[in-house]
Image (cartoon, rainbow, N blue to C red):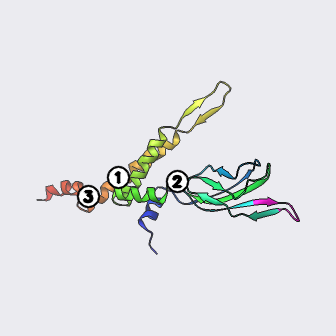
């Protein structure tokens, strides 16, 4: 079975669906909680039960693709609830937009990398007087390398398919 264009783009930019499984605690008031991920595809919420045995019981919670989960009633203070869900970096609408603008898999991958590179500008590297260090600039280097590799592949494809590069290369043959 062949992959769809969107699946090929996700594979090229390594945006495969990821599973998150985290335990949180209620405060007795809130029935809706923000999660650390967005573009949630599907998920389940379980509340901890202690009688007659300790375990987890499924709830009828709903997930918002933007990264929130809502339960029918508030979770009791200090009571655990577990979220298990599948998420990705880009939504299906984002991928479709990248394909529309980029024209093909490589073009869409380049559009996605542009979006990520824009976000990478917010990355930082710092050190504090107590010796604590933080370095999150490696992501920008990786994105630039991926962008360069896909751009080179796109140029090779264009020369083979009769793009501008191929036209210029073949002019010496006549």
Residue identifier under label 3? 159
**Residue 154 in the image: above or below residue 140:** below
Image position of 118 (left or right of 136):
left
Mark 2: give few (<14), some (14-19) or many (20+) Cα within 10 Å. some
In front here: 153 or 32?
32
Disc on the earlier residue, 1 or 3: 1
Residue identifier under label 1? 152
In front here: 99 or 171?
99
53 drawn magenta = yes
- Label 3: state its secondary structure: helix
Contact between labelled residues 3 and 1, with CB atoms less than 8 Å apart: no
Q: Which residues are magenta?
A: 47-54
Image position of 162 (left or right of 116):
left
Image position of 19 (left or right of 25):
left
Q: Which mark is residue 113?
A: none
Mark 3: give few (<14), some (14-19) or many (20+) Cα within 10 Å. some
Mark 1: give few (<14), some (14-19) or many (20+) Cα within 10 Å. few
Disc on the earlier residue, 2 or 1: 2
Give the percent coordinates (x, y) of residue 95: 44, 58
Please tell me which residue is depicted at 34% across the width and 55% down the height of the picture: 101
Could you tell me how far apart the alpha carbons at marks 2 and 3 are, in whole angstroms? 32 Å
Please tell me which residue is depicted at 70% across the width and 53% down the height of the picture: 31
Q: Which mark is residue 89?
A: 2
Please tell me which residue is depicted at 35% across the width and 52% down the height of the picture: 152
Give the percent coordinates (x, y) of residue 43: 63, 62
- Label 2: state its secondary structure: loop
In front here: 2 or 36?
36
């Amino acid at each position: 079975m062949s992959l769809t264009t969107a699946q090929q783009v996700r594979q090229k930019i390594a945006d495969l669906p990821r599973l998150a499984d985290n335990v949180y605690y209620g405060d007795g008031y809130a029935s809706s909680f923000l999660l650390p991920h967005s573009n949630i595809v599907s998920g389940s919420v379980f509340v901890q039960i202690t009688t007659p045995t300790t375990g987890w019981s499924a709830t009828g919670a709903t997930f918002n693709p933007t990264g929130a989960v809502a339960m029918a009633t508030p979770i009791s203070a200090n009571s655990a609830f577990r979220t298990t869900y599948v998420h990705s970096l880009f939504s299906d609408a984002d991928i479709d937009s990248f394909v529309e603008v980029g024209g093909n898999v490589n073009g869409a991958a380049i559009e996605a990398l542009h979006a990520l590179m824009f976000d990478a500008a917010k990355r930082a590297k710092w050190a504090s007087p107590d010796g604590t260090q933080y370095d999150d600039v490696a992501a920008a280097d990786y994105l630039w390398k991926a962008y360069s590799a896909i751009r080179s592949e796109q140029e090779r494809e264009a020369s083979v398919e009769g793009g501008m590069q191929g036209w210029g290369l073949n002019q010496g043959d006549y």
